Image: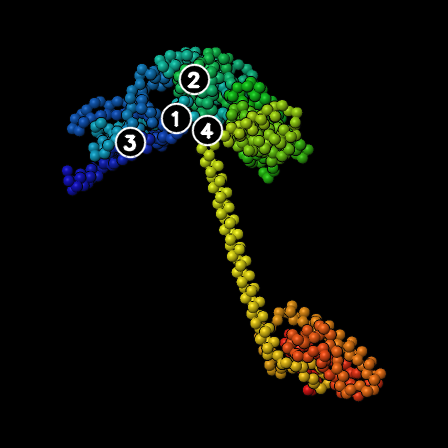
C-alpha cells in the first residue's frame, strides 16, 4: 500500500467519525480505533459520575459487550460486572439484594475493555476495532460496547486488599471517626465458594432491617435492636478490614467489601466469635447510627478539653501495655487525639504547638490551666514517641521528640527516644550525640549505656562496611582532597615569594634613584660657604622665590627632612654656645683680631661636609666685624638659616645681602 493510499484511508476513517487511541491510560500497550454510536434506546444517566482509575479510586462498571465481525451479526450481547483495571469479572445478574459471586463464576475481561469504559459516560455506546498498523492488545474484531452503569469503589490501602463499593448511598450522613460508637449490621461470605459465614441478622437481608438513624442516641447503654450490633471503632472489637469499611461509609448507607487473604484476619463480631485466619471474604455492611467523639474545638469548656485529653492518655497507655504493633498504633491515635484537643485551646503563635499546627478554635485555655496543659502535652508526646518506636515509625517518633526538645532541651526521655529513632533512621552521629547526653546525665543507667554501646558498635560496623564495599574509595577521596589542598598551599606560598621579590626589587630601585638624586644634588652644591652681611649661612644661598616652588630632583622624604632639621637645630644650638664662649674670651683680650674664627663641633663639620662645603675645624667661619667692635654690648641674635635643600618650602629672606 502506497503513502497516498494510506492517507486516503485515514481521511476516510476520519470522515466516518473514527478516532485513534494510541496509548492506554491504565494499560499502556493497548491501542484501538473507536467511534461513538447513537443509540435511540439510550437511557438518561442517573448521575453525572464518570469512570475513574487511580491508586485508591477505581470504578465498578457494568458493560454490555457485543462482538461481531464486519458484515456479520457475530455473537450476542454479554453483560459483565468488573472493576476497572482488573482482568476478571462476573456475569451481571440484576438483583435487588446483594449476593457475592463465587470464584467459579469468574470470566476474563480483556484489558482494552477498561480503556474503552474510561472513554464513555454511563449510557454511551461506541464501536471499537483494532489498529492493524500498530502492535498492541486491542479488540480482536469490531465490537460494540455500552457502558450501562458506573459507581465509585475505594481501594482503601491501594493494594487491592480491601475494596469498598457503596451500594446505597446516604448523602449528608455523618462519617464515623476513630473511637466512634456505631450501630451496624453485616453479613460475611467466603469468597472462594460464596458460603455464608456469619450474619448479624440471621437469614434476613440487611435491606429489610428497619432501624432508625438515631438509634445510637436512644439506646443509652441498652442492647441494640435485633439484627444489629453496637461497638466502638478502633477498639479491636472486630476485624480491621470491616472497621475500615465502616469508616468509609456514611450513616444510613450500605456497602459491600471485598477482603483478600492478607487482610482476612480477626473476629467477625465484638464477642470474638467466629475468628478468621487468612480467609478471603465478601461482606455486606449497613451503618445505622454514628456517634463521634467531640473534634478539636468542639468541647464545651477548657476543663472538658483537659479531661478528654487525660482520658485519651489513659486509653493510650492501656493499648500500649498490650505490646503488639497494632495495639501501639491504636495507642498513638489516642495520644494524637488528646494532643490535637489541647492544641486547639492554645494561641496560634505559641511554641507548645507541634508540627501539625492545629488552629485555635473553641474554648481558650486559662492562665491558671497553662501548667497542667503543658504537663499533659509533654506526657502525651513522650508516650506517643514510645508508641511510634514500638510501631517502628522512626521518623514520627523523632518528630514527637523534636517538639518536646524545642520547648525543653534538657528532657532526657525525649533525648533517649530520639537517639533510638535516629539510629534506626541511619543518623548514627545524631544518635550518638543524644545518647551521650543522656549517659552523661544518668551515669548509673545500664539501659542507656547498653544502647550507647550498641549504637557506637553500629557506627564502627558502618564505617568498616563502607571500607569493604567501596574498597577504600572514601580514603582515596580524602587523600586526593589533602593533596589538592597541599598543592594549593604551595601555589599560594610561591605566589607570596614572587610578590615579596617584586616588592624588594621596587624598593631597591627606589633607593637607587634616591641615591643618584642625592649625589647629583651634592655635586651641584658650591664648594664653600660665603659669609653674608649680618648673618652666617651654610651651603648655597636660597634660590629666588620664583624658583623655590619647583621640586628639587632627588628630594628627601618627609621623615628624612625631619631628621635633617633636628640635626641642624642641634648644630645651631651648639654654635650659639660656642659663640658665647668666644665672646667671653674676646672681652679679656683687647688685642683680638678683627675677625675671630667660630669653632665648629664634630657634628657640624659632618653636616658641612655632607652639604659640599670645604670648611674644616681649623678654618671656621669668621664673625662679622660689628660683633668685634662692640665688646661691651650683648651681641644681636644670629639667625642661622637651614640650608635650602632641607626646607619643605622656601621662605623669602628678610635681610638684604
State the residue at coordinates (34%, 18%). Answer: 95
- The residue labelled by disc 1 is 153
Compare marks 4 and 2 and give the one earlier in the sequence.
4
Circle 2 packing at 10 Å, graded few (<14), some (14-19), many (20+), is many
Compare marks 4 and 3 and give the one earlier in the sequence.
3
Looking at this view, is 299 or 479 the one in front? 479
In the picture, the disc for residue 172 is 4
Q: Quadrant of residue 162?
A: top left
Kindly indicate whether the residue at mark 2 contacts the one at mark 3 (C-beta within 8 angstroms).
no
In the picture, the disc for residue 29 is 3
On-image quarter of the C terminus: bottom right
Between tags 1 and 2, which lies in front? Answer: 2
Query: What is the distance, in whole Å, between disc 1 and disc 3 at their CAs?
Result: 25 Å
Query: What is the distance, in whole Å, between disc 1 and disc 2 at their CAs?
Result: 19 Å
Q: Is any atom of residue 173 visible in this view?
A: yes
Between tags 1 and 3, which lies in front? Answer: 3
Compare marks 3 and 2 and give the one earlier in the sequence.
3
Side of 101 relative to 308 (left or right): left
Between tags 4 and 3, which lies in front? Answer: 3
- The residue labelled by disc 2 is 264
Compare marks 1 and 3 and give the one earlier in the sequence.
3
Query: What is the distance, in whole Å, between disc 4 and disc 1 at their CAs?
Result: 18 Å
Amino acid at each position: 500500500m502506497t503513502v497516498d493510499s494510506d492517507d486516503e484511508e485515514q481521511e476516510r476513517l476520519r470522515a466516518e467519525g473514527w478516532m485513534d487511541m494510541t496509548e492506554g491510560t491504565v494499560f499502556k500497550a493497548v491501542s484501538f480505533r473507536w467511534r461513538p454510536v447513537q443509540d435511540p434506546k439510550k437511557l438518561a444517566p442517573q448521575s453525572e459520575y464518570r469512570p475513574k482509575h487511580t491508586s485508591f479510586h477505581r470504578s465498578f462498571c457494568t458493560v454490555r459487550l457485543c462482538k461481531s465481525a464486519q458484515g456479520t451479526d457475530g455473537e450476542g450481547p454479554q453483560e459483565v460486572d468488573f472493576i476497572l483495571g482488573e482482568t476478571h469479572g462476573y456475569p451481571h445478574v440484576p438483583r435487588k439484594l446483594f449476593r457475592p459471586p463465587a470464584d467459579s463464576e469468574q470470566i476474563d475481561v480483556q484489558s482494552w475493555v477498561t480503556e474503552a469504559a474510561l472513554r464513555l459516560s454511563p449510557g454511551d455506546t461506541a464501536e471499537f476495532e483494532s489498529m492493524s498498523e500498530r502492535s498492541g492488545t486491542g479488540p480482536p474484531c469490531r465490537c460494540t460496547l455500552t457502558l450501562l452503569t458506573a459507581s465509585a469503589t475505594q481501594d482503601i490501602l491501594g493494594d487491592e486488599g480491601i475494596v469498598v463499593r457503596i451500594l446505597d448511598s446516604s448523602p449528608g450522613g455523618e462519617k464515623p471517626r476513630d473511637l466512634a460508637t456505631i450501630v451496624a449490621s453485616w453479613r460475611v461470605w467466603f469468597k472462594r465458594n460464596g458460603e455464608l459465614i456469619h450474619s448479624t441478622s440471621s437469614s434476613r437481608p440487611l435491606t429489610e432491617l428497619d432501624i432508625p438513624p438515631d438509634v445510637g442516641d436512644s439506646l443509652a447503654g441498652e442492647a441494640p435492636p435485633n439484627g444489629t450490633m453496637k461497638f466502638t471503632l478502633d477498639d479491636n472489637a472486630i476485624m480491621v478490614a470491616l472497621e475500615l469499611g465502616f469508616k468509609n461509609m456514611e450513616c444510613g448507607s450500605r456497602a459491600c467489601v471485598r477482603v483478600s487473604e492478607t487482610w482476612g484476619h480477626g473476629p467477625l463480631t465484638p464477642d470474638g466469635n467466629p475468628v478468621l485466619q487468612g480467609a478471603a471474604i465478601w461482606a455486606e455492611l449497613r451503618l445505622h447510627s454514628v456517634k463521634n467523639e467531640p473534634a478539636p474545638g468542639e468541647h464545651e469548656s477548657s476543663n472538658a478539653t483537659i479531661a478528654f485529653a487525660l482520658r485519651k492518655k489513659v486509653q493510650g497507655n492501656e493499648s500500649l501495655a498490650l505490646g503488639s504493633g497494632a495495639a501501639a498504633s491504636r495507642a498513638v491515635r489516642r495520644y494524637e487525639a488528646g494532643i490535637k484537643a489541647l492544641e486547639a485551646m492554645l494561641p496560634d503563635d505559641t511554641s507548645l504547638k507541634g508540627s501539625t499546627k492545629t488552629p485555635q478554635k473553641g474554648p481558650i485555655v486559662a492562665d491558671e490551666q497553662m501548667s497542667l496543659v503543658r504537663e499533659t502535652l509533654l506526657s502525651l508526646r513522650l508516650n506517643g514517641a514510645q508508641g511510634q518506636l514500638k510501631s517502628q515509625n522512626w521518623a514520627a517518633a523523632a518528630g514527637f521528640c523534636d517538639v518536646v526538645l524545642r520547648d525543653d532541651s534538657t528532657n532526657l526521655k525525649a533525648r533517649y527516644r530520639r537517639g533510638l529513632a535516629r539510629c534506626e533512621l541511619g543518623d548514627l552521629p545524631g544518635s550518638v550525640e543524644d545518647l551521650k547526653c543522656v549517659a552523661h546525665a544518668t551515669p548509673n543507667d545500664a539501659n542507656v549505656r547498653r544502647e550507647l554501646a550498641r549504637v557506637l558498635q553500629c557506627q564502627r560496623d558502618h564505617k568498616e562496611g563502607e571500607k569493604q564495599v567501596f574498597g577504600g574509595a572514601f580514603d582515596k577521596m580524602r587523600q586526593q582532597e589533602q593533596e589538592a589542598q597541599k598543592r594549593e598551599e604551595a601555589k599560594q606560598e610561591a605566589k607570596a615569594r614572587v610578590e615579596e621579590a617584586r616588592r624588594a626589587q621596587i624598593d631597591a630601585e627606589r633607593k637607587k634613584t634616591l641615591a643618584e638624586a642625592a649625589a647629583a644634588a651634592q655635586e651641584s652644591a658650591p664648594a664653600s660657604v660665603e659669609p653674608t652681611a649680618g648673618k652666617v649661612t651654610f651651603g648655597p644661598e636660597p634660590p629666588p622665590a620664583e624658583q623655590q616652588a619647583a621640586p628639587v630632583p632627588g628630594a628627601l622624604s618627609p621623615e628624612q627632612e625631619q631628621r635633617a632639621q633636628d640635626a641642624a637645630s642641634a648644630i645651631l644650638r651648639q654654635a650659639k654656645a660656642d659663640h658665647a664662649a668666644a665672646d667671653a674670651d674676646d672681652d679679656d683680650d683687647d688685642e683680638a683680631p678683627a675677625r675671630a674664627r667660630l669653632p665648629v663641633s664634630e657634628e657640624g663639620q659632618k653636616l658641612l661636609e655632607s652639604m659640599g662645603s670645604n670648611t674644616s675645624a681649623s678654618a671656621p667661619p669668621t664673625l662679622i666685624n660689628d660683633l668685634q667692635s662692640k665688646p661691651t654690648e650683648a651681641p644681636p641674635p644670629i639667625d642661622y638659616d637651614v640650608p635650602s635643600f632641607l626646607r619643605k618650602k622656601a621662605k623669602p629672606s628678610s635681610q638684604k645681602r
